[in-house]
Image (cartoon, helix red, strand yellow):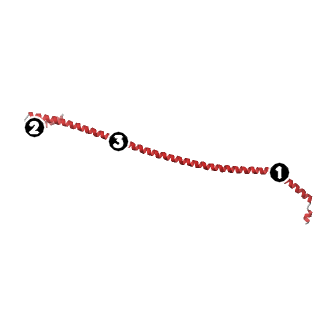
Amino acid sequence: MEFIADIQWGNALYQLVIFSLLIWVVSRWALKPLLGVMKKREQQVNDNLDNAEKNRVEAEQYLEQQREELKKAREETQAMLDNATKMSEQQGKEILDNAKEEADRIKEAAVSDINREKEQALESVRDQVASLSVAIATKVIEKELDENEQEKLIDSYLKEVGNE
């Protein structure tokens, strides 16, 4: 109890008033601006976090969009390649068909020419045989020859015609 008796109450009251006044001054002029700065900093950090999240979401969306566009471009490229392959196969088939038709046409024309030439040659041979037969018959009739002489005459006439 002696300790309580030694306290100077006036001095303690004075210190209490000064301390309260100091708390009030600090809270009024120093604490509010300090809290304001801390609040601004907290808001800035929150805004930065929100912006970072927003940017991350946008980046993911952009990445997904780029993946879709790449996939679409690959599909278009594959479709173009498939179309080009089909067109080249079709053109190759058309070229082969045209070449076959042309070869058939040329073959038919050649066969026709050969047949025509053959007919002309046969006709010419027939005419020559007929004229030869008539000439031989005329000579045979003009001369009454025996069989040996007739064969000699025919052979000589055939040689004569063969030389012409």
Residues 32 and 147: in front is 32
Q: CA distance from mark 3 to mark 2?
A: 57 Å
Q: Mark 1 = which residue? A: 28
Residue 99: percent from left, percent from top: 36, 41
Which comes sooner in the sequence, label 3 or label 1? 1
Category of crowding for the residue at label 1, using alpha-carbon neighbours closer than 10 angstroms: few (below 14), some (14–19), many (at least 20)? few
Q: CA distance from mark 3 to mark 1?
A: 107 Å
Q: Is residue 123 at all visible to an observer of this figure?
A: yes
Q: Amino acid at mark 1?
A: Arg
Residue 45: percent from left, percent from top: 71, 51
Residue at the image position 11 percent from the left and 34 percent from the top: 139
Q: Look at the image and tell me in which quarter the C terminus lies.
A: top left
Residue at the image position 88 percent from the left and 55 percent from the top: 17
Q: CA distance from mark 1 to mark 2?
A: 163 Å
Residue 43: percent from left, percent from top: 72, 50
Q: Mark 2 = which residue? A: 150
Q: Label 1, secondary structure: give it.
A: helix
Relative placement, left or right, of 69 versus 138 is right
Relative placement, left or right, of 52 versus 125 is right
Relative vertical location of residue 3 with respect to residue 85 in this rendering, above or below? below
Marks 1, 2: nearer the viewer: 1
Residue 76: percent from left, percent from top: 51, 46
Residue at the image position 15 percent from the left and 35 percent from the top: 132
Q: Amino acid at mark 3?
A: Glu
Q: Mark 3 = which residue? A: 101
Q: Label 2, secondary structure: give it.
A: helix
